[in-house]
Amino acid sequence: MRTVVALGGNALAPGGEATIAAQRERIEATADELRALHDEGHGLVLTHGNGPQVGALLRQQETSDAPERPLDVLVAETQAQIGYLLQQALHERVDASVASVVTQVAVDPEDPAFGDSSKPIGPYLSAEQAREREFETAEVTTPEGETAYRRVVPSPEPTRVLEGERIESLGADGAPVVCGGGGGVPVAVADGDIEGVAAVVDKDHTTRLVAERVAADVLVMATDVPCVYTDFGTPEQSRIEDATATELREHLAGGEFGEGSMQPKVRACLRFLDAGGERAAVAETEDIAAAVAGDAGTQIRPG
């Protein structure tokens, strides 16, 4: 069975702590879940987020005299960093050669997202700091409820995974493959030329493209909450443990699910099922193996 698992950036850096020590500790625990799946015969393809990791690099640039590196390069750097840590953790647990692929994804230069920079990245800034920056910023609220500013960039939808064929061939023998980190490095492709783009691609949409390319049977979105909820964060909050694609579409139409959190995961799962996937799930990182077995998280089926 071919199984694709998307690991959230915050799930791999608990509390947003992007130190190598903190990431290693969390990845070691996650690798135990992945080992169980590999031992059961699942051909694993792993994608991952990189929000805290890119944020850490951007903060370093803010406080150092080193030459600034463009955003697409930072995405590639964090892909390699997290892929390496996952490779090491899995190598200790599975009898297979684990590959990590620095992955590029094509985006459409005409995507409407380029006219509406809305994805916040990097450190929080004061109003004065924001005015001094050469990049676009927007007002945000910090976790403590205070008003601040952050850099914002476009978040276009990926149209193609450039290394898709290579990823498919690497995992053909069942060995784990790590790819699509941070949604992939966004690039514009024209007349055979490839150029990096200052944008951030949602990893859930890229994960769906990867799952379709490798003909995955099951897709799991691993995150830092146990499942999908209706009325999340309110007294009426309610778990969704099993749902059909039709039922989740009705929830989407009713305005459920946060645009910057659960909504892209749900939409990616639905598109995966539309393309022929057998089952999708959204679950906590600690429940990956149980979610693949159908015993945890929100189980989503066609229909």
Image (cartoon, rainbow, N blue to C red):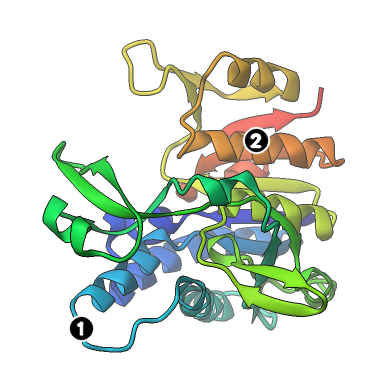
**C-alpha separation, residue under disc 1 versus residue under disc 2:** 39 Å
User: Residue lying farthest top?
Assistant: 236
Q: Give how far across and how far down residue 15 sits, in percent.
A: 27, 54
Can residue 289 be seen?
A: no
Front-most of residues 277 and 57: 57
**How many residues crowd mark 2 within 10 Å: few (<14), some (14–19), many (20+)?**
some
Residue 206, horizontal then vertical, whole percent = 66, 55
The numbered disc on residue 64 is: 1
Using residue 214 as the reference point, say whether residue 221 is left or right of it: left
Number of numbered labels in the structure image: 2
Res. 2 visible in picture: yes
Residue that mark 2 sits on: 267
Local secondary structure at mark 1:
loop
Name the quadrant of the N terminus: bottom right
Where is 65 relative to 174, above or below? below
Classed neighbour count for the residue bearing mark 1: other residues with Cα under 10 Å, few (<14), some (14–19), many (≥20):
few
- The residue at 58%/24% (across/down) is 241
x, y percent for residue 193 = 75, 80
Q: Residue at x 56, y 66 (%)?
A: 181
Q: Nearer the viewer, residue 202 or 181?
A: 202
**As displayed, is residue 45 above or below residue 148?**
below
